[in-house]
Amino acid sequence: MNATIECRQGDIARQDDIDTVVNAANAQLRSGGGVAGALHRAAGPALAEAGRPLAPIKPGQAVLTDAFDLPNRHVIHCLGPVYGVDEPSDELLAACYRNALQLAERHGIESLAFPALSTGAFGYPAAEAARVALSTVLDTLPDCPGIRRVRFVLFDATSAELYQRTLAELQGEEGAQEGKE
C-alpha cells in the first residue's frame, strides 16, 4: 500500500492540502447539521444545486460534485446508515468508505479527507464506526493505487485519539500518524 493514513482533529471544511473532502450527506444532498452543514456553508449554495440532480442517494452510496468555494477540487457525498434502522449497518457503513475510495480512484483523486460517517445524528457508536471505517480503508486501498493520502478529520480530540488508537491496532504501530491542526 502506497497511501498514508492520517487521523487528526480539525475542521473538514478547512483541508486545503487535500484534493477531495467527503461529506456525511443526507439522502437529498442538502445542507444539514454537522459535517453537511459545515461543508455546505463553506462551499456556498452551488453545492446544493450540484447535488440536486444526483439525489436521492441510498445508504452506502457515494456521488461526486465540484467543491465550489471549498479549498478542494471535489466533494464526495456519502449517505451513511442510521444506526439501528438501516441494516446491516456495518456493511452499509463499509460501503460508504469503499465506494468513496473507488470513486476517487476512478476520478484520479490522490488525496481525500473523511469525517466519522454516521457517528453524529445517525447514532453509530464511535468505536465500532472507527473500526469499520479504518479496516475498510485498509482493505480497499490496495485496489486504489492512485490514492496517496487518506485523512480522517475528527471533530474533537477524543475522536482523533480513538481513530489513531484503532488505526495502530489494525495496522500495527507502524503507519499510525498523529497530528493536530
Image (spheres, rainbow, N blue to C red):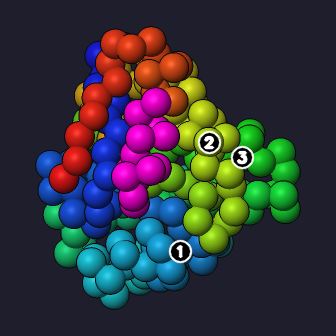
What residue do we see at 22% from left, 47% from top? 180
**Within 10 Å of the Cα at label 3, are there few (<14), some (14-19), or many (20+) other Cα atoms?**
many
What residue is shown with label 2?
A: 127
Q: Are marks 1 and 2 in contact (CB under 8 Å)?
A: no
Q: Amino acid at mark 2?
A: Ala
Q: Which mark is residue 29?
A: 1
What residue do we see at 22% from left, 63% from top? 14
User: What residue occupies the far bottom of the structure in this picture?
Assistant: 45
Between 92 and 155, the residue placed more toward the observer is: 155
- Image location of residue 98, percent across then percent down: 55, 36
Which image quadrant: the N terminus? top left
Q: Main secondary structure of the magenta part?
A: helix
Q: Amino acid at mark 1?
A: Leu
What residue do we see at 17% from left, 63% from top? 71
SS state under label 3: helix
Q: Amino acid at mark 3?
A: Leu
- Image location of residue 130, percent across then percent down: 56, 40
Residue 59 appears in the picture as rendered: no
User: What residue occupies the far front of the structure in this picture?
Assistant: 158
Q: Point out the stretch of residues depicted in magenta.
A: 152-165
Mark nearest the camera among 3 and 1 is 3
- The residues tagged by marks 3 and 1 sit, at their Cα atoms, a distance apart of 18 Å
Residue 144 appears in the picture as rendered: yes
Q: Earlier in the sequence, mark 3 or mark 1?
A: 1
What residue is shown with label 3?
A: 92
